[in-house]
Amino acid sequence: MNSDPVGAETLKIMATAKHYNYWLYQLIKPYLSGTIAEVGSGTGTFTQMLEKDGYLVTTIDINPEYLSQEVLDLQMPNLPRRLFNKFDTIVALNVVEHIEQTDQVMNNFSSMLKKGGRLIILVPQGKWAYGSLDQSLGHITRYDQPELVNLISDAGFKIVSTRSLNFVGVWGWWWNSRIVKRQLLPAWHVKLFDILAIPWLWLENLITLPMGLSLLAVATK
């Protein structure tokens, strides 16, 4: 039995949001280069896209039940030497919100990156939307933009860009998490969202909205 059944089921459900996942990958793709560490690789939804584009990817996850090459808790103070200055890009999608020792993780990210390397982080946005879904997934917090910028900058990174993503999705999350108080996103909600949100995601390619379900930040070492 998986030690994180809600997380595993959520990853399975979110993997069905193929339009959204592809759209998100296209957003981060311009910042990808060289050797890549995918931190919190989970069941490999984004690993497949990275490998299809020919990137050399090292998958890292704390959960040994997921198919990762490195089973590692990045909160550890003594990072394995084999990971020092190894990567050109670190991708951490929906990872940092699970972590208590965020300063240590940011320091480890810096140690793992080569000079000039890029850090790509996606976190849930908006403390006002924090609810039962976040709790069941083990989210310690949801981030506001200044908080995420400060976290990254304090570790010595230079911010390249930040933006809110998925304006439509945050309202579904708020309803399910704060009003209905579900423990798991309904699979049919995600599939319906993946179809109906297509024009909204296209719009977000053209304009930056003030809030959304997630925050995306890109920084350099």
Image (cartoon, grey):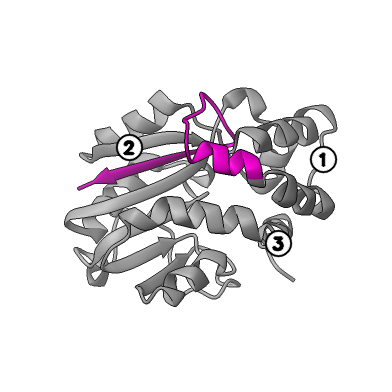
Task: Give the residue displayed 54% in from the left and 27% down from the top.
Answer: 211
User: Of marks 3 and 1, which one's residue comes earlier in the chain?
Assistant: 3
Q: Is residue 69 visible?
A: no
Report, in whole angstroms, how far the alpha carbon at label 1 lies from the one at label 2.
33 Å
Task: Give the residue displayed 79% in from the left and 44% down from the top.
Answer: 183
Per the image, the residue denoted by label 1 is: 182
Tell me whether the residue at label 3 lies in contact with that at label 1, contact meaning CB atoms closer than 8 angstroms: no
Looking at numbered disc 1 in the image, what kind of residue is underneath it? Arg
Looking at numbered disc 2 in the image, what kind of residue is underneath it? Ser
Query: Does dot 2 land on a helix, a strand or a loop?
Result: strand
In the image, taking residue 164 as reference, residue 15 lies left or right, namely right
Task: Count neighbours of disc 1 (C-alpha within 10 A) and say few if under 14, some if 14 to 19, many if 20 or more.
Answer: some
Q: Which mark is residue 16?
A: 3
Report, in whole angstroms, how far the alpha carbon at label 2 lies from the one at label 3.
28 Å
List x then y, in percent, for residue 84.
21, 64
Q: Which mark is residue 103?
A: none
Q: Picture quarter containing residue 88? A: bottom left
